Image (cartoon, coloured by chain):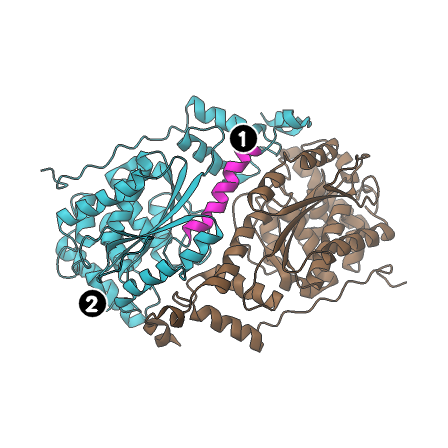
Chain colours: A cyan, B brown
């Protein structure tokens, strides 16, 4: 048994940004009928997607939102504006199509699947619901490890299998629902980055000052008591939720298949940060869709040296921010796949030529 | 004849953000299954669109990109990285579907129309091309007024008619093409805002330092010689292009019919700024889609006290940035039109209730 309790991350190819293919993609972008670089982030996104898919004409053939739902022992410590029962109630809302992510996935032509990663309720079968329940909620990380090593491994592996099963040229959009999960993500941030607890804890669904102070103290005390963890696996096991571990796995499984991953807000970033410590090449496949209004998120993105595409003051989770980046990815693919070149269009390219 | 040479802007209703309807819209948003305000900019966009359309369930039934093309006398002074002939060549590229805006409009289900507002070429008839040619290019504003008063009025009126003709619940996305038009927009900014010419002039399609210095001096000298103009009409007449005047008209025509206007980058902002001086309520209907990489754009948006939705380092024009905001507007409408309420979904609303 290794230190990671039998868990091995899948092999992920690093994306080479300086190879012949990368240069060919850049040349193709520069030949399009526009001043070189004038489509900014869309051009960079186009180039990345092309390199990930190894296609000069990249495309998103399938966009898959997967919402991972689970409960958190820490919720019993009073760190959320909502009672834990809301997790299961929201799963029902996902299944009947009334939640934000349902509406937004329909709006942007993305498929939606809901995964019970560990909701503290017996959920009735439904064609959109996948039963991957690890347990009925984690233990409270204020009192000991949130998960057992075996639970952690199972959650990661279930996620990997989901990421692995996507059709070619997918975009994976992992979302989450779990009352208490910003506290879990905050503890993961505090433990993984070493930043002060105060910088890692925000208001989540909208807690008041007293609850915020309590949440900060709980996170700080837990990491003092349990330590930061010697590997990302052990950090995840101490503080993580089932949905966070399963999201991390899904990201790893997708990236191992050279699929694009659109990362949502604070909780999804917690999953990506854990996963990236297990397999650093993961970040080559991640588009950080937006910076959340959950205060510590901006800082965490800085620590990860990633630039979010959008800044829309969102803080809902569910994948609702990540799905907003999907039209931008589609725009990017279309530029590379469909635009005419100066030569095609018979246009005077003096400006571009002058600079090359 | 009035000082605006017979031009009268159409009447535009100001949007009341404090009336009973506005409160009802906010209450509807707060009842949706999410923490109040957690969808940030999307909620604000939903509320605005609802108020503009006077619909509790707003929608974008039709998205219309109109690309206005025209030539500029100032281009002969050597202020662009591309020769003026590129304007007409790009119109052909729009008509055959190879330009960025063609690809992006298709990608986001927007209709596309090209308007010859004053291209310096005889253009063959085409079903996508609308002939509204005022003249074969403006005069150089370095040597006198770019347009005559009559040309200015005709360009504005042609635009108004186009904005007026949109079907109900449209989003108008005005774009432009015109070699030399960043110089025109810079002169308009300098004259309208009174900011130093250096703050109003950028690199456009990608000019070098020497050309940038020359462009700045041309803009500064022109406004010194011709003055800022006593009305927005006269400012537009001195420095504006035919496509800028026609875009301004289209925005006015659309807003007069309570249609949403998605404003693109620097040139479109020049049109919106002129139009907003002719009819200040226009800005209630404008969503400033993005802040351009064209340096003065950010400053102009600040002067207008508007916050752009996106910051993607774009500087192409054509409406390519504005069309990226369309999926966000559709997301916003879907939230208000399709999401369940806490009551619908039978979800414990303790958190929201605690804060109300």
Q: Nearer the viewer, residue B185 or B324?
A: B324
Q: Nearer the viewer, residue A181 or A124?
A: A124
- Dot 1: element: helix
Q: Chain of mark 2?
A: A
Residue found at the far right of this picture: B1
The residue under label 1 is A29
Crowd around label 2: few <14 · some 14–19 · many ≥20 (10 Å): some
**Position of residue A100 in the picture relative to residue B253 (left or right):** left
Image quarter of residue A218: bottom left
Image quarter of residue A145: bottom left
**Position of residue B158 in the picture relative to residue A310 (left or right):** right
The residue under label 2 is A76
State whether residue A171 appears in this view: yes
Residue B337 sits inside the magenta stretch = no
- Residue A243 image point, x, y percent: 26, 52
Image quarter hosting the N terminus of chain B: bottom right
- Tell me the chief SS of the magenta region: helix
Contact between marks 2 and 1 (CB within 8 A): the answer is: no
Q: How many angstroms separate mark 2 from mark 1 (CA)?
A: 53 Å
**Position of residue B42 in the picture relative to residue A36 (left or right):** left
Q: Which residues are magenta?
A: A321-338
Crowd around label 1: few <14 · some 14–19 · many ≥20 (10 Å): many
């Amino acid at each position: 048994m290794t230190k990671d309790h039998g868990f091995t991350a899948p092999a992920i190819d690093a994306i080479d940004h300086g190879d012949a293919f990368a240069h060919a993609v850049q040349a193709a972008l520069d030949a399009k009928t526009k001043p070189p670089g004038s489509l900014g982030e869309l051009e960079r996104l186009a180039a990345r997607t092309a390199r990930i898919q190894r296609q000069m004409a990249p495309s998103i053939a399938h966009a898959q939102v997967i919402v991972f739902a689970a409960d958190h022992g820490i919720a019993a410590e009073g760190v959320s504006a909502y009672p834990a029962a809301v997790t299961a109630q929201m799963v029902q809302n996902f299944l009947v199509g009334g939640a934000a992510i349902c509406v937004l996935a329909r709006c942007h032509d993305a498929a939606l699947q809901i995964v019970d990663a560990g909701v503290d309720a017996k959920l009735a079968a439904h064609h959109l619901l996948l039963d991957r329940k690890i347990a009925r909620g984690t233990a409270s990380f204020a009192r000991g490890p949130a998960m057992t090593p075996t639970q952690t491994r199972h959650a990661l592996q279930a996620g990997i299998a989901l990421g692995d099963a996507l059709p070619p040229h997918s975009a994976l959009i992992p979302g989450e629902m779990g009352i208490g999960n910003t506290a879990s993500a905050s503890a993961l941030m505090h433990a993984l980055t070493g930043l002060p607890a105060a910088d890692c804890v925000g208001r989540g669904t909208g807690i008041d000052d007293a609850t915020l102070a309590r949440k900060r103290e709980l996170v700080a005390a837990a990491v003092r008591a349990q330590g930061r963890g010697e590997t990302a696996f052990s950090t995840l096991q101490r503080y993580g939720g089932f949905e966070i571990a399963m999201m991390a796995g899904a990201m790893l499984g997708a990236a191992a298949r050279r699929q694009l991953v659109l990362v949502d807000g604070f909780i999804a970033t917690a999953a990506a940060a854990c996963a990236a410590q297990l397999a650093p090449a993961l970040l080559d496949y991640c588009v950080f869709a937006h910076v959340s209004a959950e205060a510590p998120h901006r800082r965490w993105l800085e620590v990860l040296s990633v630039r979010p595409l959008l800044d829309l003051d969102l803080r809902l989770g569910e994948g609702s921010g990540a799905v907003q980046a999907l039209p931008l990815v589609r725009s990017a693919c279309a530029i590379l796949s469909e635009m005419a070149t100066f030569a095609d269009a018979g246009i005077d390219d003096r400006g571009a030529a002058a600079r090359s």
